[in-house]
Image: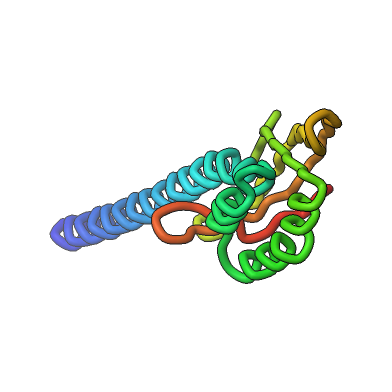
Amino acid sequence: MSILKQRAGLVAGVVLVLALAAAVVAGIGAHRAAATADARAAALAAAKERVPELLSYDAATLDDDLSRARAQTTGSFADDYGKILDDVVKPNASERTISTAATVSAAGVVSGGRDRVVVLLFLTQTTTTGAKDSSVSGSRVEVTMQPAGDGWKIAGLKPL
């Protein structure tokens, strides 16, 4: 009987170790899933706030607005977008007195994890040229968000 008791004790010990290992693996998986969900939610919220800042400017406050737009970006996109602002947006907005205001109509996460999230935004953009000519247009953009500093910034923007 003592051999049977030893084997039963050994089996019970192995089962206990396996159960503990499974619990640890499940806990790690749950933590990772929660961290991914949190990152996606934070990136979505940041995109809804930052993209209108990126795409809106007023001819009367152009330098401040374009500076604020640059602050919404990170990585190589920051350099590329800064060049567009300097070479295209600023001269045209100044010369033609163009102002534009972008708002998010709808948004959702396309894909992503803890270090990169792709978001789809539906935008409404009102553009005013001079004092009287105004137009409203809708667009969709795919925005890549990446953590930067203590938040998420725009690392890419692709019109669809």
Q: Is residue 25 above or below residue 82?
A: above
In the image, 104: left or right of 98?
A: left
In the image, 91: left or right of 107?
A: right
Q: 28 or 76, which is in the foreground?
A: 76
Identify which residue is drawn at 59% across, 39% down: 48
Q: Is residue 32 above or below residue 57?
A: below
Q: 57 or 120, which is in the foreground?
A: 57
Q: Is residue 80 above or below residue 30?
A: below
Residue 56, position in %: x, y? 67, 42
Residue 107, position in %: x, y? 67, 35
Residue 88, position in %: x, y? 79, 60
Q: Quadrant of the N terminus?
A: bottom left
Identify which residue is drawn at 34% across, 50% down: 23
Q: Is residue 105 above or below residue 58?
A: above
Identify which residue is drawn at 67% across, 33% down: 104
Q: 34 or 7, which is in the foreground?
A: 34
Residue 156, position in %: x, y? 68, 59
Residue 116 location, quadrant? bottom right
Q: 11 or 117, which is in the foreground?
A: 117
Is there any visible trace of residue 108 in the rendered image?
Answer: yes
Identify which residue is drawn at 39% across, 55% down: 150
In the image, 33: left or right of 144?
A: left
Is there any visible trace of residue 112 in the rendered image?
Answer: no
